[in-house]
Amino acid sequence: MKAFFAFDIAKRQQVQLKIGISGVSEANAKQNLDAEIKGWDFAAVKQAAEAAWNKELSKIEVKGGTADEQSVFYTALYHASLSPNIYTDVNGQYRGTDKQVHTAQGFTNYTVFSLWDTYRALHPLMNIINKKRSADWINTFLAQHKHGGMLPVWELSANETFCMIGYHSIPVMADAVKNGIHGFDKTYALKAMMAYAESNRFGLGAYQSKGFISNNDDHESASKTVEYAYDDWCIGQFAKSIGNEAVYKKYLHRSLYYRNLFDPSTGHIRGKVQGFWYAPFKAGEINNFFTEGNSWHYSFAAPHDVSGLIKLYGGRQQFAAKAYDLFYSKEPMSGRDQADVTGLIGQYAQGNEPSHHMAYLFNYAGQPWHTQALVSRITKAFYRNTPDGLIGNEDCGQMSAWYIFSAMGFYPVTPGSGTYALGTPVFDEVKLHLENGKTFTITARNLSGKNFYVKNMLLNGRQYGKTYISSVDFEYGGSMVFEMDGKPNYRRGVNAVDMPLAKTTDETFVAAPYFEMSSNKIKDSLTVVLKSIDVDAEIYYSIEEVGEAAAFHHYTKPFVLRNAAVVKYYAARKKFKSPVNSQQFYKVVTDRTITVNAEVHPMYTAGGADALIDGITGTTNWKTGEWQSYFDQDFEAIIDFKKQRTFSYVAMHVLQDVSPWIIFPSEVQWEVSSDGKNFTPVISIKNSIDASQDAVQVQELGAAVNASGRYIRVKAINGGKLPAWHESAGQPSHLFVDELIIK
């Protein structure tokens, strides 16, 4: 609903206006208005609002720092307090995710849950300073599951937008329980968690059966795999907290699925197409395998199993070196233009959420001085007291919540664990006023712009050598003292006992084997190489060439395929094994070669020109990595059949999805030649489906022909500019092709 008001008033005359809103009805909006603002005393309303905000912002008191730093801090706390929004009328009614009207019983219903962003720091902050409100939010989650059949992903005004990934309401609940918040039905909450995690939404079916998601299962598959794994860990922790050991073990196992996308040859989380690593691989490329980021951003995205990541990288020193490379990488950011990825330090992007925990990871490797230097740099460079002082999108308070935590000197790397990694404070003193009436005071001695390294610490008056604290350390009040210095203390936080621990151990988990080749297409023969990141696991495989079950063999060395086949494979250690996965291998024709005389888009290569003549056509999912794109240009290719042939049918398999700028070619022209130089026209095929149809569709633009020659030249005319109805009208378009069919 939109409204516009115009008033014809005399000079200096004032207009007073009160507005009431409701998600339920006009009558409720009027009732809300009458109850919330009873009179017309503007000064009184303003005074009441100031008092309410002063009370809210006084939950954290800071002293010291500069005037600008204090302004930045309280602006951040204000931003962090703006959402979620109350979505309950004064009579208790609200509109649910089933679009029906309900009455809240024992809680206040809310809206605006940007959970992909806010589970990281905003909700952990509120689980400390706003426990009652957090319980209301969780009860809202459960009401949305009850009415709409699912927990929220990114909910707005009782509408699920699905604009981000994961099931991140679950970390909010797990972290709440860890912080002593109990005012909700935990048994029902676990049921709701499992209902989402065991659904088939957004690649979850493949995730459950295979142990990972490939891009042909669902786009942004690498991001979804690693984020689902963390959410599963949170389900496990929640189940354990209420005594459900069976569910705890099940989801602890699933939480290690992120390892199935770790490629040891590159040292990165890497996307897959079917069972193969996507190539060419560029760690800095933002592409359809990742959500608002690249492989750098998601290769550290296992906050529940940092110890496991350290082991994958080869040890603490190697892990720290990799994290150092993240911040000081010279590799350029490439691929899709992503406006959210801002505030760069190397490949680190403070302006977007996947990076937010990464500066704190050095604590886990025994090098906390790097964390202190980086956090100090980020707080100074990317949070300024200017109109454009935030380096990225506020994202419903998450960008500011990062600053609030970091300015206090600690950060929730793993929400749901009750553990906070220590950094470096911004202020001389911070007082956290808790809802239980207790106060936790954080003091920084000898702090200055140059003295951001931690020399020593006290916790409740005692020497403290660890580089983390736990929620139990401050939930009943107390004190923490940082003693600061201008140089690193290379002896503090270097012993394992003093490092934060985020470790997930499950002896039943065996990583899925992976193929160490780039193709599933057989010309004359193909050597199949299988490997596993589990050095003590053994691999087993079977080869089915005629669709009948075949016996599994112990893999001891690469084997050769000469015909089309399905290879099934798994890894085993002791009595435990990985999921049994399968991979189709295709026999492709070898009687032709292709030369493409156009520049393929670097994000959509489908593995090279041969993909256009391999006999395999794609689906309507253009994000799988199996389509080629030719952007703002015509397509041209020459196919050499090596000898004179007679042709009876020619076609180009193409895709259209206008919303993401993909339009069918307007025309496909076919020519033949005997010498590869002089070509004769055969047929020109016009496209009859215009770009006014905003639907994903594929078609085989083909026709019967009667022609002879050794060479065929095909030219597809780009569909042109985006149509007038498109939000990017007038911009150039992609031409997507995946197969040239010639009989």
Image (spheres, grey):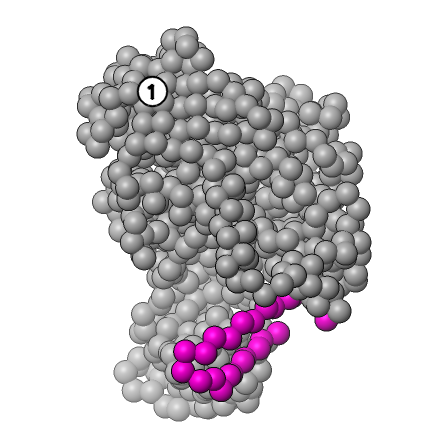
Q: Is residue 358 magenta?
A: no
Tag 1 secondary structure? strand
Can residue 138 be seen from the camera position used here?
Answer: yes
Q: Is residue 1 above or below residue 182?
A: below
Q: Which residue is mark 1?
A: 482
Q: Residues within 10 Å of mark 1 (few under 14, many from 20)?
A: many
On the image, the x and y values in percent for residue 69 come to: 30, 41
The answer to whether residue 232 shows anywhere in this view is no
Q: Position of residue 681 (x, y in %)?
A: 39, 91
Percent of width and height locating residue 55: 52, 41
Outermost residue, top side: 462
| Image position of 118 with respect to 713: above or below | above
Q: Residue at x 46, y 49 (%)?
A: 79
Q: Is residue 93 left or right of residue 482?
A: right
Q: Determine the main secondary structure of the stretch shown in magenta.
A: loop
**Which residue is painted at 49% across and 50% down in the image?**
50
Which quadrant holds the N terminus? bottom right
Return the residue nearer the eye: 124 or 74: 74
- Residue 402 left/right relative to 184: left
Query: In the image, what residue type sits under mark 1?
Result: Phe
Q: Is residue 626 left or right of residue 152?
A: left
Q: Give the image location of residue 724, x and y in percent.
A: 46, 86
Whether 23 is among the magenta residues is yes
Point out the stretch of residues depicted in magenta: 1-26
Q: What residue is at 51 percent from the left and 75 percent from the top?
A: 15
Look at 54% across and 47% down and name the residue there.
52
Q: Nearer the viewer, residue 253 or 122?
A: 122
